[in-house]
Image: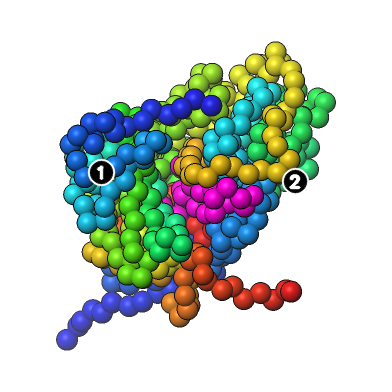
Amino acid sequence: MLKTQEYCLNFGPQHPATHGVFQVILTLDGEKIVKAEPVCGYLHRGIEKLAEARTYTQVIPYTDRMDYLAAMLQNLGYVQAVEKLMGIEVPERAEYLRIISGELSRLTSHVLGTGVYALDIGGFTGFLLCFREREKMMDLLEELTGSRMTLSYARIGGVADDAPEGWLEKVDRLMDEMPGYIEEYNGLITGNEIFQARTKFVGELTPETAVNYSLSGPVLRASGVNYDLRKNMPYGIYDRFDFEVPLGTNGDCFDRFYCRVREMEQSVRIIKQAIEQIKEVDGPVMGKVPKVLKPPKGEVYHEIESSKGIIGYYVASDGSNKPYRVHVRRPSFVNLGYLDEMVRGVLIADLVAILGSIDIVLGEVDC
Amino acid sequence: MKERVKAPVEEIRQKFPYVEVDEQQTVIVPADKLLELMQGLKNEFALDFLTNETAVDYPEESKFELIYNLNSICHGYTMMVKTSVDRDNPEIPSVFPIWGGANWQEREIYDLMGIVFTGHPNLKRILLDDKFDGHPLRKDFQWESVRE
């Protein structure tokens, strides 16, 4: 008499395809996933609690350590939240430098996301190719901020320093080359037959589910929901730039991946426009900010579009020089909340494709 | 910085007379009316995107404040809803049946703040170990320090 039985498999915590330390306890029926239980928290450092014992400025470096792949965007969300709470005006030039470094951060994150996804599917060359450009961008960010990944460049009221001489020209030159590089990625990764076979019509998400589960970023937009905070609720000076929001149609792994590739093109466009406009803008890069920051009693919630999705900062002040409470709405964390239902019934090999297409970073999930 | 479009709080107040609105246009609702209000906001005001859910501890007032940030994708407006629960008996209905996005966010609040969400399908610790004692984001949580 033949019979089948379900069995349990640990995916992670130490598995290269989890992009960090993340565990999924799988219940399998043959090669089909019956149930998936994600277990996170291996990288939990208690940043929200630590922030309560730091001054407002001292919190900035902690935000880097969440999504360390797009650190500038994490900084930006926090400082804009505090600026909103205190009503601080930011000088024009600082706003432009924030846009340029922020979009450069988004590019590094998307380039890595693209390359690592190719690696997840099994294409090693694509992975190395993407690292080539990432290196150039990180060199530029290092020249600007002194650090390659944990930038801490944004300050409450502006940015740390003006761009060094000749830096903007270097960024401009790289942005001229970028479309050619993106073409190469498309040739090597996007157009690859095996890659498409592994990702098309895998892990499909309907727009209704994506909205209901508060998914954001390329994961939401790949399902065809036009929701990008840079366009829908412009923060900073994003309303001055002309760019498009790439959308997918099927909401499958391929669309999520390809949304990122096309977003890179838009980031290049934004940086080019910002470099053109910043030439006209001179002046300080720090606004008038008191030496000791004591925001009035109150609370604020501010969200921006990070590379993974919507990152939101809730900051409550009790009138002292330390925040009473800081909460971060991390896009990777919220996007993972739907993983369990998304992988039910798919083959175990597709789990890697689906998890990779959500593009998580564990520093942010675990906070 | 440009201000974002705010939700039509005046209309909401007329529709749901039990809510209060403060000067920052935040809607404050008693905990027992939470689900009714949330369902109404989703169905009638198209606030279909629960972007953020969190909690703050106020030990002096003996309460936890729960904060819900809602967005409307089609209308482009945003609003904040607040409610509070008793600190000694922190129990509140889960909004998971209304917005699936509350799934992990409520687990996180339960884990770090110790608020029980009734009706949540899988309420257990998410970031900390299952055997961990206490809820670290509470203000009276004693942290062990290795340094003096």
Q: Is residue A39 magenta?
A: no
Q: Is residue A342 above or below residue B62?
A: above
Q: Is residue B49 left or right of residue B147?
A: left
- At label 1, which amino acid type do we have? Val
Disc 1 from disc 2: Cα separation = 49 Å
The residue most toward the right is A165
Nearest the eye: A302 or A244? A302
The residue tagged 1 is B19
Quadrant hosting residue A158: top right
Residue A147 - label: 2
Q: Is residue B130 above or below residue B68?
A: below
Q: Do the residues marked 1 and 2 share a common chain?
A: no
**Label 2: which secondary element:** loop
Q: Position of residue A190 (x, y in %)?
A: 48, 39
Q: How many C-alpha atoms fall within 10 Å of the one at disc 2: few (<14), some, or many (≥20)? A: some
What residue is rendered at 62% in x and 27% in y? A89
- At label 2, which amino acid type do we have? Ser
Q: Position of residue A204 (x, y in %)?
A: 31, 47
